[in-house]
Amino acid sequence: MRKILVTAVSGDIANGILKILQEQDAELYGCDVNSIAAGMDRVKKFWQSRYAVEEGYTEELLGKCLEYGITHLIPVNEREIEVVSDNRKLFEEHGIKIVIQDERILDICLDKYKTAQLLTDNGFDVPDTYVNPCLIEVDGSSYICKPRKSNGSKGIKVYSAGEIADIKKRYYADETAFNNINDNIQGEDCVYQRYIDSDEEYTIGVFRDNAVINTIAFRRELKNGYSNIVKLSNAGEYAELAIRIAKLLNLKGYINIQLRKKDDRLYIFEINPRISGTVRFRHMLGFTDVLWWLDMLDNIAVPEFRCEYNEAVGIRELNEKYVILKT
């Protein structure tokens, strides 16, 4: 029996994963930086963990894995993924299989500027992307400023053309003047990406093992940076684009591609190298990427996916739950 540890179980992605795994023959464990978390009643054992950036996080996580005989580890948020990746050999030496991308893909896709460079260099449409806003040619376009390293949807700010012009007046496009621009604006290294003015936003799930590349696409309606409503889209252009990217990255496992469509062009603005928010909806439609990833790690063949549905809609709802902690 698989003994699976899922991190960050207060979040929606982890809870989607847990709901899927509850239907399987598996023993589930969970941790979170909060002492009370939404997924704590979905696991056999829950504990409050350190933050991934805290000293001792890796040692604590490995210790818990060994204590409970964890066979598979699913780190969910970006910071945890980075730290676990940096220490993956420690876990693998103990036979613990980790559901994360390889170091090369994480290095590229957790960095929005590296992602934009790679895609641009390989002929994909990408919004103009800068790390130095002083290099932006003001032409009436707005720009989205967001942390260069992936961080969910936190720290995003939209600057109008006038605000970009003001930034250029206050700072010069030279190394000395630019040193602290991002600190003054956002508090960490950022990218500035041309805003694609379109309400056609899509998210594409891609899974690849040695034999197959499976894809599924949804049109998104956003609320507070997250998919509030997603509608299945079977258009072939999204599958074709996803397959090209999977081959470019030499992908194994799952990634999520986010883009906007305007004037028949697909502008990719992000690739998330982790399990993403539509995980349970994908699973309900037969795109079972969580189970495929576990199977791939266990040397079980992944089947080719063919969507059986022409129309499907996923709606994110506000839900409440009550957990009895002690009687």
Image: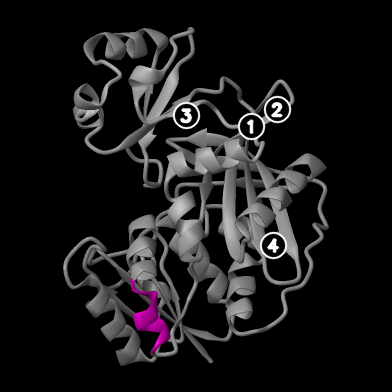
| Residue 71 vertical placement versus 234 (above, below) | below
Kind of residue indicated by mark 2: Arg
Horizontal arrangement in the rendering, residue 28 relative to residue 246 (left or right)? left
> Are circles 4 and 2 on residues that touch, CB within 8 Å?
no
Whole-Å distance between the Cαs marked 1 and 4? 27 Å
Kind of residue indicated by mark 3: Thr
- Residue 212 in view: yes
Q: For residue 125, which numbered disc appears in the image? A: 1
> Are circles 1 and 2 on residues that touch, CB within 8 Å?
yes
Q: Which residues are magenta?
A: 87-93
* Residue linked to disc 4: 287
Nearer-the-camera pick, 204 or 35: 204
Residue 87 place in picture, x, y as percent? 34, 73
Mark 4 is surrounded, within 10 Å at the Cα level, by few (under 14), some (14 to 19) or many (20 or more) other residues, namely many
Whole-Å distance between the Cαs marked 3 and 2? 17 Å
Task: Describe the element under mark 3 as helix, strand or loop.
Answer: strand
* Residue linked to disc 3: 129
